[in-house]
Amino acid sequence: MAYQTFLLDIDNHIAHVRFNRPEKANSLNKVAWDELKAIFEELDENQEVRVVILSGEGKHFCAGIDLEMLMGINQFNGIKEEGRKREYLRGTILYLQDTVSAIEKCRKPVLAAIHKACVGGGMDITTACDMRYCTEDAFFSVKEIDMGMVADLGTLQRLPTVIGEGMAREMAYTGRRVFGAEAREIGLVNRVYPDQEAMLVGVKEMAAMIASKSPLSIRGTKEMLLYTRDHNTRDSLDHIATWNAGMLLSEDLMKAFQAKMTKTDPVFQD
């Protein structure tokens, strides 16, 4: 499908999604939010896709929500009855939250390749990804605090599980920029690359490695990691036991064993 604000390519089981509003620093207008949700719901269902790369065209990764869209919040003042005004506003926030969560709900691992600005809504989006990689000049900022608001699309909920409570609070309270080297030091990103070209080469290599594994096992592993994040150890162990009772005796298991015995690469069904 063709999109107004994104580019999407699929090759060798790897989907490459690119923000494509470079003239606006890849900020997200209403169309972009709608398309982001649709893309990741589509990729979740597309059996050909085993892993997703998310990157940005132009000078920046993503500058977050488009300011014109944010200023459009004033439209709610046209609703005279206070209860209904608040209800509509809450519904809008929940829709944007669902859009970001579509990345996390996508059963395929999502690798964010970040250069230059990743701020505001860009932070919400990257914290919903499985792994993050960046360039040395990339910078991350929970920018909402400088706009007199509280981040509400997932950063405050996901960032502490990525970098710990202390650093997450520091970023959220100050809005300061965290550049590539520090981002790696605090665990916000897996690796730092000297430039965007080198980063995309490295991220594509990682994506290809993931795509070569059993798709069923990768999907199950992502589900277990997310479930464990949100549940205690006992419940998580019970969940994986139930999962493997249903999924362990798969064709993928036999193919993996046979490949080890014959020293060949296994070929898995999508």
Image (spheres, rainbow, N blue to C red):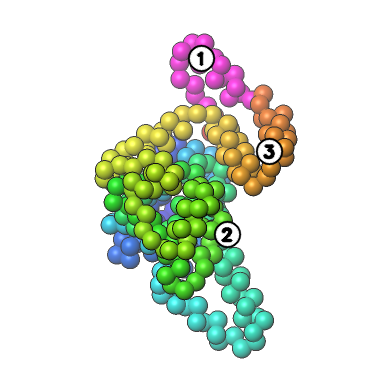
Residue 57, located in which quarter of the rendered image?
bottom left
Does 255 lie within the magenta span?
A: yes
Q: Earlier in the sequence, mark 1 or mark 2?
A: 2
Along the horizontal axis of the image, is 97 left or right of 244? left
**Amino acid type at image mark 2:** Asp
Instruction: List x then y, in percent, for residue 178.
Output: 37, 54
Q: Residues within 10 Å of mark 2 (few under 14, many from 20)?
A: some
Question: Which of the numbered marks, if any, corresponds to residue 260?
Answer: 1
Q: Which residue is identified by label 2?
A: 98
What secondary structure is the magenta-colored segment mainly? helix
> Magenta region: which residues?
250-268
Q: How far is mark 3 from mark 2, CA to CA?
A: 27 Å
Name which residue lies at 58% across and 31% down.
Answer: 217
Secondary element under disc 1, as helix, strand or loop, is: helix
Does 231 lie within the magenta span?
A: no
Q: Earlier in the sequence, mark 3 or mark 1?
A: 3
- Whether pointer 3 and pointer 2 mark residues with C-beta atoms closer than 8 Å, the reply is no
Q: Which residue is identified by label 3?
A: 233
Q: Residues within 10 Å of mark 3 (few under 14, many from 20)?
A: few
**Amino acid type at image mark 3:** Thr
Q: Using the image as rendered, state which of residue 63 and residue 92 is in the foreground.
A: 63
Secondary element under disc 3, as helix, strand or loop, is: helix
Name which residue lies at 46% across and 58% down.
Answer: 170
